[in-house]
Amino acid sequence: MKRREFLGTLTAPVAVACTACLAAACSKSSGGGTNNAPAPPSNVNFTINLNTQLMTVGSSVAQNGVIVARLAAANQPSSFVAVQESCTHQGTNINFSAANNQFICPNHGAIFNTSGANVGGQSTAPLKVYTVAVSGTTLTVTG
């Protein structure tokens, strides 16, 4: 059998095998699908001292599975946002991008706005948003 004939006989089986592998890689049961992340933390209750953390607009801190970001200068609840730290796609810890006011997953590029809504990337589920309260220079996150 000539090389060309031999390669021609492999084309269909290889294509079928590749298609099956790709389908399996993207299915939820294999860990490649959307929303395979662990559940977001519940019963969250912690405080942050605003004299030592989150002192500048655009700064963020992760604690207890939650990432808190400062959006504005005033010490009031609307100046902060607290969302689950793990991406809703596969659970990778997200980062806050001060330049874009967005949370970004470094793993597959999911992008979330400050309301927790997915605005790009592979994830389709929103981030859990936690309640923020401020009393003087103490920020409390609950949820």
Image (spheres, helix red, strand yellow):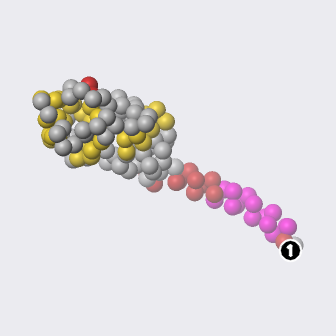
The reply, left or right, for residue 4 in relation to residue 136 is: right
Would you call the spot at circle 1 few (<14 residues within 10 Å), some (14-19), or many (20 or more)? few
Q: Which residues are magenta?
A: 4-17
The reply, left or right, for residue 30 in relation to residue 129 is: right
List the residue tagged with mark 1: 1
Residue 98 appearing in the image? yes
- Residue at 29% across / 37% down in the picture? 56
Residue 130 point in image, percent of width and height: 24, 33
Q: Quadrant of residue 84?
A: top left
Q: Quadrant of residue 102?
A: top left
Q: Is the magenta region chiefly helix, strand or loop?
A: helix
- Residue at 26% across / 25% down in the picture? 78
Task: Give the residue at the far right of this rendering.
Answer: 2
* Residue nearest the viewer, comparing 109 with 3: 109
Element type where label 1 sits in the image: loop
Residue 92 point in image, percent of width and height: 38, 50
Task: Check the picture and name the quadrant holding the N terminus.
Answer: bottom right
Taking the magenta stretch, the answer to whether it contains residue 15 is yes
